[in-house]
Image (cartoon, helix red, strand yellow):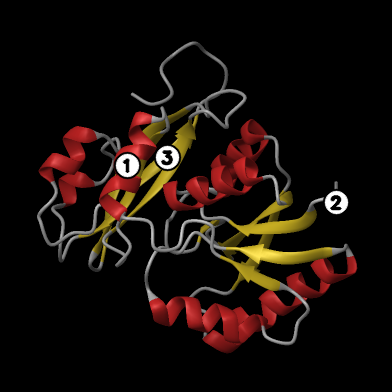
Amino acid sequence: MATPERIVLSWSGGKDSCLALAALVAGGEWTVAGLLTTITEGFDRVSMHGVRLEAVRRQAAALGFPLDTVFIPQQATNAAYEAAMEQALTRYRAAGVSAIAFGDLFLEDIRRYREERLAGTGLTPVFPVWHRDTRGLARDFISQGYKAILTCVDTRVLAPSFAGRPFDEALLADMPPAVDPCGEHGEFHTFVFDGPLFRRPVRITRGEIVQRDAWCFCDLLPVEGGVEEPYD
């Protein structure tokens, strides 16, 4: 049997990244060499999602995969983002990584951008959950026992009260019909703290709810020790 090739997964800490990781692990074709997360300098938070770097570090440790971080400036231009990513790609090629996976679901322009950026790099783009039905995928995520919380919502399409809610059947039932169940249009982002892939839950608690322009963020605070629920 051929040895599985090494792959890195673009990692936000959210449910689509987690589902992509589950697909890679189950498929057996790849060895997941690490999780790659983009962090905004000065905030030490996952870009767009607003999750603290420490929470994502604990998440990766609970999953048992190395976390690689790429820091980008606040309000980074495409050029700044691509320059930072190129440094990471160079490291991966030198380490024998042959592919990068993404949790994209159906946005053709995003997939095309990723394919164009990786063309000629020696790294193959892989899309493990591409074109999966998003309503079915959201329900599969819940029924399989994964647990996640909404870290931020676009208040132009969702009420601020959705920030900080668990991603569960009640949430899906309350979502407006125009909102994609997986938030693929950017309506919301999530943080996964438990599930079949996890060796242990990531202990977090909800912190301050903050509105920044159109976005409403729920701060997630790592919990030290204790026996409380993963979030309360």
User: According to the image, label 2 marks what residue?
Assistant: 2
Q: Quadrant of the C terminus?
A: top left
Which percent across, then down, holds residue 92?
A: 80, 66
Image height of 223 relative to 26, above or below = above
Label 2, label 1: how many angstroms apart (C-alpha)?
Answer: 49 Å
Residue 170 in picture, x, y percent from top left: 17, 34
Residue designated by label 1: 208
Alpha carbon distance from label 3 to label 1? 8 Å
Nearest the camera: 62 or 182?
182
Q: Do the residues under discs 3 and 2 have CB atoms within 8 angstroms?
A: no
Q: Position of residue 128 (x, y in %)?
A: 54, 57
Pick the residue in front: 191 or 170: 170
Residue at 25 percent of width and 68 percent of height: 213
SS at mark 1?
A: strand
The numbered mark, 3 or 1, whose residue comes first in the sequence reads: 1
Q: Is residue 60 left or right of residue 139?
A: right
Q: Nearer the viewer, residue 177 or 89?
A: 177
Query: Circle 3 is placed at which residue position?
Result: 220
Total numbered labels placed on residues in the image: 3
Answer whether labels 2 and 1 touch (C-beta < 8 Å).
Answer: no
The label nearer to you, 3 versus 1, is 3
Helix, strand or loop under label 3: strand
Image mark for residue 39: none
What is the three-letter code of the residue carrying label 3? Leu
